[in-house]
Image (cartoon, helix red, strand yellow):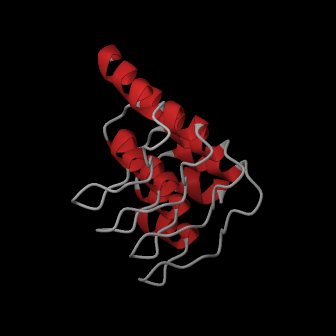
Amino acid sequence: MEGQTEIVKHLLQNPKLNPNQRSKEGWTPLNCAITNGKTDVVRLLIEREDVDVNLPNKDDGIPPLANAAEQTDEDCLRLILDREDVDLNRADHDGNTALHLAVKQEDPDIVAALLEYDGLGLDLKNEDGDTPLAMARELGNDAIVDML
C-alpha cells in the first residue's frame, strides 16, 4: 500500500494533472480513495487547494463528506471537515447529507464528529421526507436520538 501512496504523491506533483477528473464510471479521485479506505491518499488530495472537496460522483451524487460518513471512516471524515470550503449539507441524489448517512449507519462517533461543526443542517429532509432525527427514531437508536 505504501508504494501506491508514493505513486499518487508523484502523480500529484504534475501541474497538468486535474485532481478532480472523474473516472469513466463518474467517480472522483477523492471518493475513490475514501471508498477504498486509503486515508493517506485522501490526505494527499485534501492538501491540494485545487481539489474540490464537494465534488460528487456522477452516478449517485454522493459528495466526499457524505461518502466518508457512509463508509464510517472517521479519519477521512475529519480530514474533509478540516477544509474550510467543505459544504456540510451537500446531499446525494437521494437528498441524504453526511448526517443522514451517519445516522443510517448508526455510527455515534461519526454523528458526534459532524455535530462539532456549526452550520450542520439538523432539520434537512431527504427525498423520503426524513430528517436525521426522524431516521434515528425509526431505527430505534436512542443514543443517536439523544445526540440530535
* Image-quadrant location for residue 57: bottom left
Residue 75: give x, y in percent of width and height. Answer: 52, 33
Outermost residue, front direction? 16
Q: Is residue 47 above or below residue 102?
A: above
121 lies left or right of 104:
right
Quarter of the image containing the N terminus? Answer: top left
Q: Residue at x 68, y 52 (%)?
A: 115
47 lies left or right of 84:
left
Q: Residue at x 33, y 45 (%)?
A: 32
* Image-quadrant location for residue 110: top right
Residue 100: give x, y in percent of width and height. Answer: 50, 64
Outermost residue, top direction? 2
Q: Is residue 128 above or below residue 3?
A: below
* Numbered circles on residues, count: 0
Outermost residue, right direction? 118
Q: Name the residue nearer the viewer: 30 or 125.
A: 30
* Image-quadrant location for residue 140: bottom left
Instruction: Specify whether residue 25 is in view.
Output: yes
Residue 59: give x, y in percent of width and height. Answer: 28, 68
Q: Residue at x 43, y 83 (%)?
A: 127
Quarter of the image containing the C terminus? Answer: bottom right
Instruction: Specify whether residue 106 is in view.
Output: no
Residue 20: give x, y in percent of width and height. Answer: 44, 53
